[in-house]
Amino acid sequence: MADSNGKSVIITGAGRGIGRAIALRLARDGFSIMINDLDAGPAGEVVAEIEAAGGVAISNGANVTDEDQVAAMVQQAAAEFGQVDVMIANAGIGVQKRITETTLDDFDKILKVNLYGVFLCGREAARHMLPRKQGKIIFAASTSGRRGAPFQSAYCSSKFGVVGLTQSMAKELGPEGITVNAYCPGIVNTRMWEEVDRERSKLMGKPPGTALQQAIDSIALGRMEEPEDVANFVSFLAGPDSDYVTGQAMLVCGGVHMA
């Protein structure tokens, strides 16, 4: 368990899936949590779950693609908690399409959330952290940001972009006492992978479940990743044990991809 020392964190896309698991883990670690999600219902449920366990949490509905809303989100968290110690830009979306059928709107939509949204969260967090010369910025990348995959031209491009953004910001902000890292999950048991399986299996001309089973068969550890597996690793990145780690896009994927 990370020793948070009463620190605070913003987690985007935290109403479900990986974001929810990260929020619950960091609440157990002692962080005060801002749960950001466009869907107020699930966000409120996570806040209630944290509070019921004795933790501190608030919700926020900012759209991560809107720079004014992201700036206001960071300001709200700073006002509520006194400061923002950790930013976790976790919100993301996906699409499965053949490259010949991928529209510019498809590409733009993915990049706006997965890359531009991450950039805005990182930038606004940095603006808040720089005067204190302290803080941790953590981005959601993917194994798809470390290697290409069929039917994922837009998604892979966005996640490769996150890796580049991570390295660039780490170089720039390291001398200012701010670390920047990313986590790269693999095949995670979430609603997103249900959608991936349905669409990818269809593109393969196979019945539902085919793409998922092929993906699971590629996991060295022999089982599908759970959101909590990712959350445990993010706990390390958010805590003091990772103070000398920066500029890394770390694989937490059960051996789907090995660097």
Image (cartoon, helix red, strand yellow):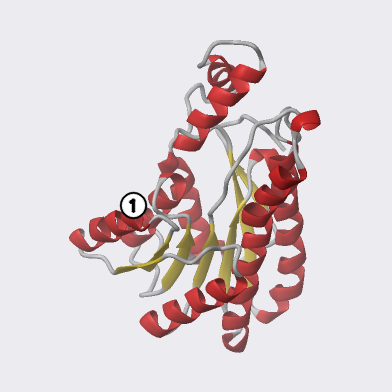
Q: Residues within 10 Å of mark 1 (few under 14, many from 20)?
A: some
Q: Is residue 27 above or below residue 81?
A: above
Determine whether the residue tagged by mark 1 lies in a helix, strand or loop.
Answer: helix
Q: Nearer the viewer, residue 130 or 207?
A: 207
Residue 52 location in percent, x, y?
18, 59
Number of callouts: 1
How far across and how far down the image is residue 175, in percent? 72, 78
Residue drawn at point x = 64 percent, y = 68 percent: 120
Position of 45 with respect to 252 (left or right) is left
Is 112 placed left or right of 224 in the picture?
Answer: right
Residue found at the very far bottom of the displayed protein = 131
Residue 220 shows up from this direction: no
Q: Is residue 108 left or right of residue 45?
A: right
Q: In which quadrant is the C terminus drawn?
A: top right
The residue lying furthest to the right in this view is 100
Query: Closest to the observer: 23 or 43?
Result: 43
Residue 107, percent across and down? 73, 45
* Residue beneath the point at 71% across and 67% down: 170
Residue at left 41%, top 43%?
A: 228
Q: Quadrant of the N terminus?
A: bottom left
Q: Is residue 50 above or below residue 207?
A: below
Q: Position of residue 179 (x, y in %)?
A: 63, 68
Q: Amino acid at mark 1?
A: Pro
Residue 79 shows in the view = yes
* In front of the other: 49 or 192: 192
Q: Nearer the viewer, residue 153 or 137?
A: 153
- Rendered image quadrant of residue 77: bottom left
Residue depicted at 74% across the width and 28% down the height: 98
Residue lying furthest top in this view?
206
> Badge 1 is on which residue?
42
